[in-house]
């Protein structure tokens, strides 16, 4: 399983079904951006911004700035822990 894969437990035969990043994006997630705290090479905290398919799309110095930047581009920010 890749980082961008999502599990769905309601497959037609009762087994888990794997959804790809593209499948997830097709479900309306194209309007979402995920924000996650990361450390840069020097160990300083930064906030990474990712599209719904996991593509990195930006960095910000704080969570508030990251959320503001996401909203400024008409996306809905979500935190990832």
Image (tube, grey):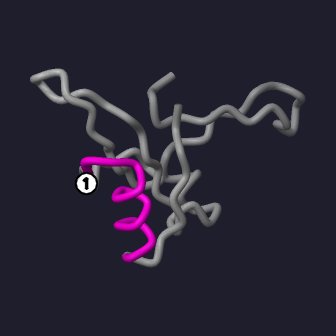
Q: Is residue 17 above or below residue 66?
A: above
Nearest the eye: 21 or 11? 21
Q: Is residue 80 above or below residue 43?
A: below
Nearest the eye: 63 or 76? 63
Q: Which residue is mark 1?
A: 58
Nearest the eye: 61 or 79? 61
The location of residue 36, given as percent across then percent down, is 42, 39
Magenta segment includes 2:
no
- Give the quarter of the image for residue 47: top left
Number of marks in picture: 1
Relative to 11, is 23 on the left or the right? left
Q: Residue at x 51, y 22 (%)?
A: 1
Magenta segment includes 67:
yes
Classed neighbour count for the residue bearing mark 1: other residues with Cα under 10 Å, few (<14), some (14–19), many (≥20): some
The location of residue 9, given as percent across then percent down, is 81, 31
Please state the extent of the stretch shown in magenta in the rendering.
60-72
The location of residue 28, given as percent across then percent down, is 61, 66
Q: Residue at x 18, y 21 (%)?
A: 43
Secondary structure beneath dot 1 equals strand
Nearest the eye: 28 or 34? 34
Q: Is residue 41 above or below residue 28?
A: above
Secondary structure mostly seen in the magenta stretch = helix
The location of residue 56, given as percent across then percent down, is 29, 48
Q: Residue at x 26, y 51 (%)?
A: 60
Residue lying farthest to the left in this orientation: 42
Q: Residue at x 20, y 28 (%)?
A: 44
């Amino acid at each position: 399983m890749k980082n961008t894969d999502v599990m769905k437990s309601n497959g037609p035969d009762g087994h888990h079904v794997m959804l790809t990043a593209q499948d997830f994006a097709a479900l309306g997630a194209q309007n979402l951006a995920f924000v996650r705290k990361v450390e840069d090479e020097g160990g300083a905290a930064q906030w990474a911004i990712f599209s719904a398919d996991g593509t990195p799309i930006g960095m910000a110095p704080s969570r508030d700035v990251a959320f503001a930047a996401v909203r400024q581009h008409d996306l809905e920010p979500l935190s990832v822990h």
